[in-house]
């Protein structure tokens, strides 16, 4: 689950980490009031969406009058901002963050993330921070520094010093960095984050270090014990179908194809999508209803899939291990009747009571096509979606 920049900075401030002064606004008038409250003669207005690349897309600008604050806030609020990370659909801008400006000498990059390969938390830093960090990582990977943190010890003082030296920090900036990094690590661990990214981490002209931007992602599997963070979820920033899936407690990812997929088990779902692609089709989604799928979850799955107007056929692929195929067949029949499915439905059942399940589908009188194998199911789905 991603957080907005202003939410992430509130968490930093609660951990006594200094950030630029700012205020969130949801109207042009409120943005002007925020600028007036902050004082000064220049401000940064930032669109609040769950995507990077806002600056290049025109979502982050420095303005030098309250009239410009009003005009930019009015232009951003209610718009859809498309960046390199959320193209082609973009995301709606419902709030903006108005912040004081700083006198910046250098822009650095700093992030803390979970490295699946080492199974450790890793600190990543670079002296080449800012909007082009992705290009830096691709073209000059030697400029990207890494420190692997021992799970029992966390980030250590010697690692902070090593990174500070490598980033060419001296004096107060060196001291600030060596205090900031352990504080960020504590925020990362105590909030069950999967990513904490500061880009840029700025060195000001008076040689102080502080986070100018902040991106946080909370580990979804930890949200059950992070109720306060879960309450910060902004459903407007995710696909409507994904929001419905979250509410139904099923795993769904929207794609851009026309064959809806409903599968029990993530691995089987990936294999199903691969086979559809191999047979010349394009999956409309990833949908894992779980190993213990019930008729209710099948019905919910249908409703979510059919929210996508591009879906021309639905492929259901169920392996009956924990759950019996005849129970799933009853759920499919019930769901097709309840939801009023008007597109072809292809079903492949295998495992416990698969024959009984296929018999129930054949006797239902509904336009449900029973496939003999997964390959056959993929071929039928592609044929009926074209």
Image (tube, rainbow, N blue to C red):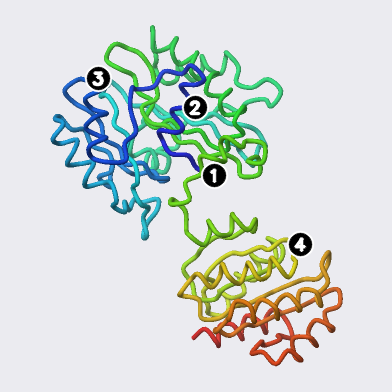
Residue occupying image coordinates x 58% and y 22%:
186
Q: Position of residue 316 (x, y in %)?
A: 66, 75
SS for callout 4? loop
Depth order, front residue of 138/151: 151
Q: What is the CA distance from the residue labelled 1 to the residue labelled 3?
A: 33 Å
* Closer to viewer: mark 2 or mark 3: 2
Q: Is residue 378 above or below residue 73?
A: below
Q: Which residue is mark 4?
A: 291
Disc 2 crowd rating (10 Å Cα; few below 14, some 14-19, many 20+) is some
Residue occupying image coordinates x 60% and y 70%:
273
Q: Which residue is mark 3?
A: 103
Q: Is residue 335 above or below residue 246?
A: below
- The label on residue 1 is 1
Q: Which residue is mark 2?
A: 11
Residues at circles 2 and 4 in contact by the CB criterion of under 8 Å: no
Among the 4 quarters of the image, the one containing residue 299: bottom right
Query: Looking at the figure, which quarter contains the N terminus?
Result: top right
């Amino acid at each position: 689950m991603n957080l907005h920049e202003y939410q992430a900075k509130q968490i930093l401030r609660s951990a006594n980490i200094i950030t630029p002064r700012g205020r969130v606004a949801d109207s042009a008038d409120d943005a002007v009031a925020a600028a007036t409250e902050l004082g000064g003669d220049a401000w940064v207005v930032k669109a609040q969406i769950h995507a990077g690349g806002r600056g290049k897309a025109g979502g982050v600008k420095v303005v030098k009058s309250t009239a410009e604050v009003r005009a930019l806030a009015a232009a951003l609020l209610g718009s859809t901002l498309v960046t390199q990370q959320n193209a082609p659909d973009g995301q709606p801008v419902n709030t903006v963050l108005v912040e004081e400006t700083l006198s910046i000498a250098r822009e650095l990059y700093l992030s803390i993330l979970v490295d699946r390969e080492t199974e450790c938390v890793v600190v990543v830093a670079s002296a080449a921070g800012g909007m082009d960090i992705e290009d830096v990582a691709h073209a000059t990977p030697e400029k990207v520094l890494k420190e692997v943190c021992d799970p029992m010890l966390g980030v250590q003082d010697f690692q902070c010093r090593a990174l500070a030296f490598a980033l060419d920090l001296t004096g107060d900036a060196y001291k600030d960095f060596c205090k900031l990094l352990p504080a960020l690590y504590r925020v990362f661990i105590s909030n069950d984050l999967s990513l904490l990214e500061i880009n840029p981490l700025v060195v000001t002209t008076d040689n102080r270090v502080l986070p100018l931007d902040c991106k946080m992602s909370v580990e979804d599997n930890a949200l059950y014990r992070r109720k306060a963070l879960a309450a910060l979820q902004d459903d407007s920033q995710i696909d409507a179908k994904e929001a419905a899936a979250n509410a139904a407690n099923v795993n769904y990812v929207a794609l851009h194809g026309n064959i809806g997929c409903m599968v029990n088990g993530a691995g089987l779902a990936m294999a199903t999508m691969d086979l559809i692609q191999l047979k010349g089709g394009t999956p409309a989604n990833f949908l894992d209803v779980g190993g213990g799928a019930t008729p209710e979850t099948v019905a919910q799955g249908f409703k979510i899939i059919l929210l996508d107007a591009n879906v021309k056929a639905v492929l259901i692929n169920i392996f009956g291990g924990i759950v019996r195929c005849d129970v799933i067949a009853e759920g499919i029949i019930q769901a097709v009747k309840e939801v009023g499915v008007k597109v072809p439905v292809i079903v492949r059942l295998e495992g416990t009571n698969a024959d009984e399940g296929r018999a129930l589908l054949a006797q239902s009188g509904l336009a449900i096509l029973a496939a003999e194998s997964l390959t056959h199911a993929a071929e039928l789905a592609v044929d009926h979606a074209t």
